[in-house]
Image: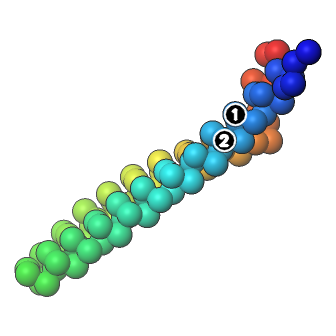
């Protein structure tokens, strides 16, 4: 007699995977904070380069934010529209 059905096993691992995307959010937040801090340091050293520094920082943060949005979409798919359950 099996204690865990295959469906329950897949759903449990999907929930763990969706919770693991929280680590992606922590990494993204830390990276964006680090980038903003370094931008402020660069602007304080060379105020005349403010435009170029801010532009580069904003583009970099937008790219890193897309990783968080992608992780969020994957976690929603794992939780609510799990395609793996139908394969059992």
17 over 57 or under it: above or below? above
Measured from the top left, where is residue 57 in percent x and y?
Answer: 28, 65
3 over 23 or under it: above or below? above
Q: Residues within 10 Å of mark 1 (few under 14, many from 20)?
A: few
Residue under the image location 35 percent in, 69 percent down: 33
Which label is found at residue 26?
none
Measured from the top left, where is residue 88 in percent x and y?
Answer: 82, 15
Say which quadrant the N terminus sits in. top right
Which residue position is annotated with label 2? 16
SS at badge 2: helix
Which residue, as the protein is rendered here, is positioned at the far right? 1
Q: Determine whether, in the image, residue 74 is placed left or right of residue 88.
A: left
Location of residue 28 by image quarter: bottom left
Along the line of sight, the residue nearer the viewer: 36 or 49: 36
Kindly check if marks 2 and 1 are in contact, taking CB atoms under 8 A apart as contact: yes
Tell me the CA gap for discs 2 and 1: 5 Å
Which residue position is annotated with label 1? 13
Q: Is residue 77 visible?
A: no
Residue under the image location 28 percent in, 66 percent down: 35
Q: Is residue 24 visible?
A: yes
Q: Residues within 10 Å of mark 2 (few under 14, many from 20)?
A: some
Location of residue 40 by image quarter: bottom left
Measured from the top left, where is residue 54 in percent x and y?
Answer: 26, 72
Measured from the top left, where is residue 48 in percent x and y?
Answer: 10, 81
Q: Determine whether, in the image, residue 64 is placed left or right of residue 2.
A: left
Residue under the image location 8 percent in, 80 percent down: 46
Q: Determine whether, in the image, residue 44 is placed left or right of residue 18.
A: left
């Amino acid at each position: 007699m099996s204690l865990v059905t295959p469906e329950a096993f897949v759903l449990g691992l999907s929930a763990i995977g969706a919770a693991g995307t929280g680590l992606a959010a922590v990494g993204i937040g830390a990276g964006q904070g680090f980038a903003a801090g370094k931008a402020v340091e660069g602007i304080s050293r060379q105020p005349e380069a403010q435009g170029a520094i801010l532009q580069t920082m904003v583009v970099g943060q937008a790219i890193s934010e897309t990783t968080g949005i992608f992780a969020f979409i994957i976690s929603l798919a794992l939780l609510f529209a799990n395609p793996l359950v139908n394969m059992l």
